[in-house]
Image (spheres, rainbow, N blue to C red):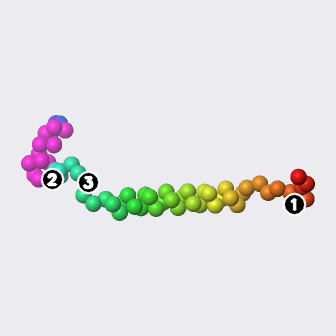
Amino acid sequence: MMTLTTLGVLAQAAGQVGSGRIQGGWGYVWACYGSTIAVLVLYSLSLWLRRPQAPHDAKE
């Protein structure tokens, strides 16, 4: 039975191990920012549409 260490050594010897850094990835980051902003805008809009209305004939 192979252990994880043995598999790691074999993968490194085969040249399948990267440098440990993610290359690129900014598209994912901007997609997350965009979806977060969209959710916050839609939630704010839903709160604004459901806000309680003051009676029109209220005297102050």
Q: Residue at x 67, y 56 (%)?
A: 47
Q: Residue at x 15, y 53 (%)?
A: 16
Residue labelled with disc 1: 56
Question: Mark 2: which amino acid?
Answer: Gln
Helix or strand or loop: what does disc 2 sit on? Answer: loop
Residue labelled with disc 3: 22
Residue 52 inside the magenta-drawn segment:
no
Q: Position of residue 57 (x, y in %)?
A: 91, 59
| Label annotation for residue 16 | 2
Question: Mark 1: which amino acid?
Answer: His
Q: Nearer the viewer, mark 3 or mark 2?
A: 3
Query: Which residues lie in the magenta part?
Result: 4-15
Give 14 or 25, whichever is nearer the viewer: 25
Kindly indicate whether the residue at mark 2 contacts the one at mark 3 (C-beta within 8 angstroms).
no
* Residue 27 placement: quadrant: bottom left
Give 48 or 23, whichever is nearer the viewer: 48
